């Protein structure tokens, strides 16, 4: 009998006792399943490092839980993503059903695919990282705190905070960082896959060429002024930033060095890593195996 582990964040917005029981029913036939619930931030990284003999690791929670798991994995691990969070970027990008039980049923027989990961000052990330604007947005939403059940605010809160942040940028925002080999920019977005994220049901398409099997993509507006904001919002939902003259763009990169004029917030996979003076983003190619329902290439 093969062994597997199920790492669960019981505070994730889509995790309930009923859904967890349904997931376990789908996974248990034919395998020896170990279930572990996280109790605090970074606990999932500790749990994964302590696993012994698990052929597969299933992750039931949000993108933050997956990020913690990835930072504890070795190169031989096989990961299955069960959507239980607010946005579930990786699960949706891989075509995993949003119903956790249906996802578990599908992933039991899904083939593994090797994908790349990103690193920001050594911290792994699955799909996206950023310095400046999007990291500040993550921080503002986190400051709202969690609900009484431990869950984070939803899409409405993110939309409201994004609107307030953009309104605060109506005055011209000059370059605040230097990207080695590219130039100066107001902020920097780094994508390891496509889409960059989701806003409700709509994919955020700021780096439309980024793919999980490749290196990192960079999108960095040089300046942000009142007239440019609607255009940048358009890039987010329609794409096109890679063709804009005032946006620095790099595709399939191995390394991106960023130096900030002043300490700026840094986020990876929607997790606030605090303020930084500089960041080294690195592509960790062929880093991990992930279960993908589609038998075709992830770059399609």
Image (tube, grey):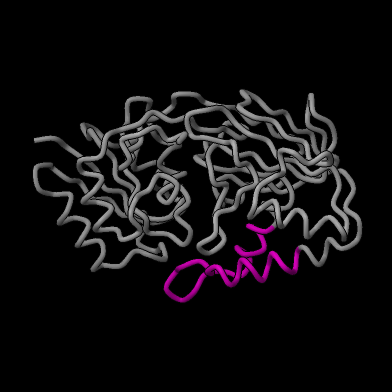
The region drawn magenta spans 137-165
Considering depth in this image, is 164 or 109 the residue closer to the camera? 109
- 91, 46: nearer the viewer: 91
> Which of the 4 image quarters holds residue 30?
top left
Kindly identify the residue that appears in the image at 31 percent across and 49 percent down: 7
- Residue 271 belongs to magenta span: no
If the image is split into quadrants, where does the C terminus sit? Answer: top left
Q: Is residue 92 above or below residue 258?
A: below
Relative to 49, residue 86 above or below: below
Label count reads: 0
Identify the residue shown where x is 85% and y is 52%: 224
Q: In this view, does 242 lie to the left or right of 22?
A: right
Seen in the picture, residue 217 relative to 90 is either above or below; the reply is above
Question: Residue 230's image quarter?
Answer: bottom right
Q: Residue 138: horizontal and vertical position, in percent?
A: 63, 57
Relative image position of residue 114 (x, y in whole percent): 38, 28
Front-most of residues 198 and 130: 198
Seen in the image, is 239 located left or right of residue 58?
Answer: right
Q: Which residue is drawn at 28% across and 53% down?
A: 103
Quadrant position of the N terminus in the picture: top left
Please state the horizontal and vertical placement of residue 34, each as a whole percent of the image.
20, 46
Chief secondary structure of the magenta span? helix
Q: Residue 194: image x %, image y %?
A: 53, 42
């Amino acid at each position: 009998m093969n062994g597997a582990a199920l790492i669960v964040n019981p505070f994730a917005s889509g995790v309930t006792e009923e859904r967890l029981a349904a997931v376990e029913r789908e996974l248990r036939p034919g395998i020896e399943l170990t279930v572990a619930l996280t109790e605090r931030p970074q606990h999932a990284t500790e749990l994964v490092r302590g696993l012994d003999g698990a052929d597969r690791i299933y992750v039931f929670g949000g993108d933050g839980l997956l990020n913690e798991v990835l930072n504890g994995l070795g190169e031989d691990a096989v990961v299955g993503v069960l959507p239980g969070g607010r946005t579930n970027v990786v699960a949706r990008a891989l075509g995993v059903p949003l119903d956790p039980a249906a996802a578990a049923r599908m992933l039991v027989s899904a083939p593994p695919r090797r994908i790349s990961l990103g690193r920001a000052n050594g911290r792994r990330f699955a799909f996206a990282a950023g310095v400046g604007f999007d990291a500040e947005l993550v921080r503002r939403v986190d400051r709202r705190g969690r609900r009484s059940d431990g869950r984070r605010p939803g899409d409405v809160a993110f939309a409201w905070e994004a609107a307030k942040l953009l309104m605060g940028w109506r005055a011209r925002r000059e370059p605040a960082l230097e990207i080695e080999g590219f130039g100066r920019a107001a902020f920097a977005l780094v994508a390891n896959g496509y889409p960059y994220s989701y806003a409700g049901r709509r994919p955020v398409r700021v780096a439309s060429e980024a793919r999980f099997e490749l290196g990192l993509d960079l999108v960095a507006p040089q300046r942000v002024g009142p007239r440019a904001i609607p255009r940048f919002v358009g890039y987010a939902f329609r794409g096109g930033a890679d063709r804009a003259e005032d946006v620095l763009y790099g595709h399939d990169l191995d390394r991106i060095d960023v130096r900030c004029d002043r300490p700026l917030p840094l986020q990876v996979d929607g997790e606030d890593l605090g303020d930084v003076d500089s960041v080294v983003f690195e592509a960790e190619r062929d880093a991990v195996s992930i279960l993908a329902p589609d038998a075709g290439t992830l770059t399609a």
